Amino acid sequence: MDILEIFLTASFWTAAIRIASPLIFATMGELICERAGVLNLGIEGIMVAGAFTGWFGAYMGMGLWGGVALAMATGMLFGLVHSTLTVPLGLSQHVVGLGVTLLATSLTYFCYRVALPEVTSPPKIEAFQVWEVPVLSEIPVLGPALFAQTPLTYLAFATVAVVAYGLYRTPLGLAIRAAGENPAAVAAQGLSVTGLRMGAVIVGSGLMAVGGAFLTMSAFDSFFFEMVNGRGWICIALVVFGAWRPGKALLGAILFAAFDAFQIRLQQTPLGAQVPYQIFLMLPYFLSILALVAMSRRAEVPAALMVPFNRGDR
Amino acid sequence: MRLEPIANPSMARTLVPPAAALVATVVIASLLAMVAGGNPFRVLGLIIEGAVGSRFALLETLNRATPLIFTGLAVAVAFRAKLWNIGAEAQLYAGAVMAVVLGTGALAWPAFALLPTMAAAAMLAGAVILLVPALLKTRLGVDEVVTTLLFNFIFLLFVSYLLEGPMKDPMGMGWPKSPRLIAEARLPRIVDGLRLHWGFGLALIAAGVVWVINTRTTLGYEMRAVGQNAEAARFAGIPVGRVIVKTALLSGGLAALAGFSEVSGLKGSLTLDLSPGFGYSGIIVAMLALLNPLGVVAAALFVAGIFVGADSMSRAVGVPTYLADIMLATALLLMVLAILLTRFRILRE
Amino acid sequence: MTGAEAAQVVLRLDGITKTFGALVANDNVSLALEKGEVIALLGENGAGKTTLMNILFGQYTADAGTVEVFGQRLPPGTPRAALEAGVGMVHQHFTLADNLSVLDNIVLGAERLWSARSDRRGARARVAALAERFRLRVDPDARVGALTVGERQRVEILKALYRDARILILDEPTAVLTPQETDDLFDTLRQAIAQGLSVVFISHKLHEVMSIAHRVLILRHGKLVAERQVARTNPRELASLMVGAEVTAPAVAPSEPGASILHLDAVSTPDRGSAPGLRDVTLDLRAGQIVGLAGVSGNGQAELAALIGGLCVPETGTLRLDGESPSRWTPHEAVQSGIARIPEDRHKTGTIADFTLTENAILECYRDGPFSARGWMNWRAADRFARGVIDSYDVRCPGPGTRIRLLSGGNMQKLILGRVLEPGPRIILANQPVRGLDIGAVNYVHGRLLEARARGAAILLISEDLDEIMRLSDVIHVISEGRLSPGFARGSMGAAELGVWMAGHGFDEETRHAS
């Protein structure tokens, strides 16, 4: 197959959008947190926890959407832990975030082992099925990519729209953005910075967990250790790449996923077969670092990101 | 709610919260042990016994503590200067790779010359690995948390490539594994017959050296100044960028010594499971030690004891070993909270 | 309103007491504000004015006492209640988000938080109407970060008016304004009073209080010590009430300037964000002379201080020390060349809060003997130096091992003063050296600066307080948008004339004359 032809196949773009979906959820989650002024390094662990609970919920007969809801609730619970420590108590967002990642990851693995002590290979669930939008899915190339996906992918795109609308068109969104720019301005208007920030972290963490659940409930149909594999950290890079704007972050996630889908296909070409596969696997991480470097000069970081706010400070 | 600093905290103020954090950690672990169907007292007892209950257990704990002291020091040094090095894992593997490159016959030197060369080369490799994120931070303002984290994944893939390609052991029967180190490249045991190698001694020395650097040298003073208030440090004429780079070199070098010591002292060859996350556990060690290099030794022993004890407990009663990771993550979070409570009063308003 | 002419009390504070640890910030303060009235709260820094207003506004909770607005008692500790009751506050440090638009900043918090849509069109129309009515011109779509200080203040006032404030609290509103902008502000306030608003005006500037207020309340050490009708008092009386005892400021005798030590020749530096860089600045610092730099903050003072302090180098033009241009110019070189630098912000740039006094004392010289040699610290020498500074500069502290965060602002400033003056510098760069200090500490710092002048140091005094500049300086320059006015000799210019320069007028004429 000619390398450039890859870009013209429907299966390539379909795969790209599928790969992008969990990143979109988690990136939106992180974006909400950071817009409110909190860096959430718990993202990696929260995605692991969401991947497990979503899948496990479905496995236990809660139904697929029940599983998604359980994942969301799990994420929100870790968001509550994170935000309680970082917002009213103002503890280091770096340390707490890493702590939450370690805690969520180890708790997940522990629960998995306790819940399924005897199994050697994890059981499968009936995952989300592709739901083709009539007519639209018949558009060449882009039709199947955008309109022949699982419901969770549609939900991911809907999430971007909701987050964008919420942040830019509602009073609550304005308050959240202001909390990330100058919390004193929010407090002076009688709004609770603590409440806004905690709320943002909790909801954002919930979205991260849904991103994790996508992996076990839509992309695959089972839970494996190490399956999140740094996606959380990549999402943090995507937020920076998207300059803290939902639309640009979405674009970044799709670009990134397209690149990922491309390298998978490139591996299968005669040219790709000559290169060690590890090089291909490294590329997404390199790409993330490059994105950070490229945006470092222009990025409009929320002014109060990582700055704790304490009412009555003197 | 408001935090009010306490000017002169009482003895109880300084001691009770950390103690309560430890108790709470144990309580949470007990509850989880019960969830997993174990008797909490027996589980905790088995962990302690498995960590320090016999000569074998004790030596195992000391061995496990060795890489943790190095990575703990690496993190403590970096965090003290507010350089968020989360990449100790990659730096550890860099050190291990250098140990293999020089220690598998490339240099046919006697041990007294070969071992220091290997250690120095390992430090250099680890330093270079962290240099890139440090320069990206100082030159371009790229956040080092994400870059160091991503480097972990990149470097592990690189090691995987090495072990399946240029560095693969021809006698390894297809396993991705490096050839074994030559005898001169192995760190000797401290006492004949006891399974404890000089890597542990080197770790203790490293802790002492870092302590001296922190308290007695201009570099230590500069690192603390930059970490606590970079703006004031810059104003006073401390070359902030250069201090961060020096910190990175020291931190990366220390983490790399963990890889060198594991390969040269314990394992004898490099595999992809050389480190079960020593780089990440180093963060816990450093935080529990309050970034104090001597405290790192104690914290590393504690963390290693939990890991070793949990392994043996799990074999006995089947409660998953991840209990150890949970205990440590909980201890980390509760400890930063406890330290806050030793210094601030929480007022309700 | 019914025919009764009896004044309506709109705001009543009763028995407000507030302590922070051992400090009594407000001690049983009571006051009442009438409709259409402007009262001034007058007091020194630290007298408790801001604390009192923060309690009124619900940002602090009082230990005792009540707040009543329009006869309704306000629940303590919620700014929301104060806002809804019609109290609007313009803080000393603006509470605006720089990266958001003016409109965003104004409507923030004004709408129901959970409504599904913000009504931008309606908001825009209301802001335009208010701007018209109170003559507060400002572009609603501009980024706040791009506005001048005066414009930002207009946004703050609009914000309060947008929320139907009927009582305006202004905390030191003129501290950052040029005299002309101050006049504009007063016009707006008179407009507001005419429309039935009431104003609490916090200040320590006597002439402003005299010009805008009807009634003056004087706070000292947290207590309300006096109340005067403006019509029946004078600045002299207010000054002595404010300070309490008669405090004598150090007398300033004219000086005999010596040789030029530091000279800037047509220096320019690049702009930094919205802050202008220096434009073609020529400045001469001579031995035994205090040069005052007047100007509204954010007009290039920080850049000039950074340049002389070694934190940046000229983009064009030259900096000369004793006639020679240094090849390297860093903070270390600046200190080595005998420049003492008193930074603008002693908390953020002057000290490291968790370092001990000793560690802070050697911050600029730890690399030099005797404090270190070949990379090894000599803590004994450092301790000796710190003890010397503590003794000679009257730093009140438990000892050199104390963390500096536990010291008061005045004692912190004395340590900085000792750190930079002890080596006997030839040049002193004093950037806002007395900001936030009580009058005793102010006189101490000024005394030390005059002492240094007497022994031949060249001093550059940067301050936003025109009175301080006019009292101490032998020569005054005004800085505006990075340009430097010619030097005016002591006594040759009044505040009003300097104010014209501060507002940016006069520079163009200057250029025209030159060309």
Image: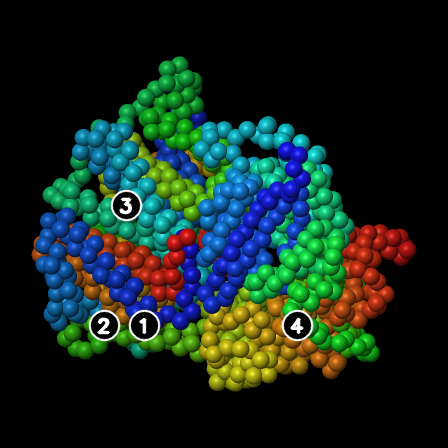
- In the picture of the structure, the residue carrying the numbered disc 4 is C245
- In the picture of the structure, the residue carrying the numbered disc 1 is B11
| SS label for mark 4 | loop
Measured in 3D between alpha carbons, the distance from the residue under mark 2 to the one under mark 4, in whole angstroms, is 75 Å
Residue type highlighted by circle 4: Ala
**C447 in relation to C315, above or below:** below
* Residue B333 visible here: yes
Query: Residue at position x 38%, y 73% from top?
Result: B210
- In the picture of the structure, the residue carrying the numbered disc 2 is B197
Q: Position of residue B48 (x, y in %)?
A: 15, 64
Measured in 3D between alpha carbons, the distance from the residue under mark 4 to the one under mark 3, in whole angstroms, is 73 Å
The chain that hosts pointer 1 is B
> Dot 4, crowdedness within 10 Å: few (<14), some or many (≥20)?
few
Q: Position of residue C49 (x, y in %)?
A: 59, 58
Q: Are marks 1 and 3 in contact (CB under 8 Å)?
A: no
Q: Position of residue B182 (x, y in %)?
A: 25, 68
| SS label for mark 2 | loop
Query: Residue at position x 68%, y 37% from top?
Result: C195
In this view, the residue in front, A111 or C90, is C90
Frontmost of labels 2 and 4 is: 4
In this view, the residue in front, A128 or C129, is C129
Measured in 3D between alpha carbons, the distance from the residue under mark 1 to the one under mark 2, in whole angstroms, is 40 Å
Query: Residue at position x 11%, y 70% from top?
Result: B54
Frontmost of labels 4 and 3 is: 4
**B98 in relation to A195, above or below:** below
Residue type highlighted by circle 2: His
> Dot 1, crowdedness within 10 Å: few (<14), some or many (≥20)?
few
| Colouring method of the image | rainbow
- In the image: residue C400, left or right of residue B31: right
| SS label for mark 3 | loop
